[in-house]
Image (cartoon, rainbow, N blue to C red):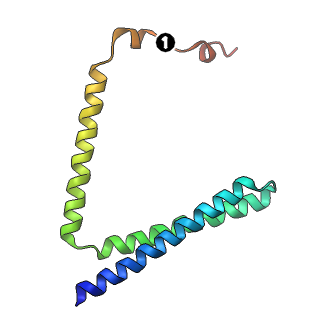
Amino acid sequence: MQNKKNQSNVGLMIQRCHKWRVRRKQFIDQARNTPDEIERERLLQAAEHCVRMTNAEQEKIDSIRDSKEKAAAVAAAEAEMKAADAKDDNADTEKTDTDEEMGFPDFITGLN
């Protein structure tokens, strides 16, 4: 019974997170189209508030999650990071000498 209640609570929290994300997107879109600087700043601050609320809801969701789910999520994230590191290492070893000899483009060196 407790698990069903937690699932229901988590479902509601996810809905609230989605609502806050949608509101944030709306505020940012409005800010992009607003010529008034003061109104733009107000909209961006409202969007920032939405981010804080989303993060708070997400922390609640994470605290309710089962420890097995947390362990599985952590293991998956670590495996993903190891795979990304291995891919980066392979990409670094594939560099050629010409990549290192190219230097800076003219628009960077000719700034005077």
Above or below, 66 against 97 in this view is: below
Quadrant containing the N terminus in the rendered view: bottom left
Q: Position of residue 103 (x, y in %)?
A: 49, 12
Quadrant containing the C terminus in the rendered view: top right
Q: Position of residue 66 (x, y in %)?
A: 23, 73
Residue extending farthest bottom:
1
Above or below, 5 against 61 in this view is: below
The answer to whether residue 48 is seen in the rendering is: no
- Horizontal side of 39 relative to 57 (left or right) equals right
Q: Amino acid at mark 1?
A: Gly
Q: Position of residue 77 (x, y in %)?
A: 26, 52
Residue extending farthest right:
36
In the picture, residue 29 is in which quadrant?
Answer: bottom right
- Horizontal side of 81 relative to 20 (left or right) equals left
Query: At x 67% / y 16%, what residue is drawn?
Result: 111
Who is closer to the viewer here, 38 or 8?
8
Label 1 secondary element? loop
Q: Position of residue 46 (x, y in %)?
A: 64, 67
In the picture, residue 64 is in which quadrant?
Answer: bottom left
- Horizontal side of 11 relative to 103 (left or right) equals left
Query: At x 25% / y 46%, what residue is drawn?
Result: 80
Above or below, 37 against 16 in this view is: above
Q: Residues within 10 Å of mark 1 (few under 14, many from 20)?
A: few
Query: At x 40% / y 13%, what residue is drawn?
Result: 100
The answer to whether residue 68 is seen in the rendering is: yes
Which residue corresponds to mark 1?
103
Who is closer to the viewer here, 30 or 41?
30
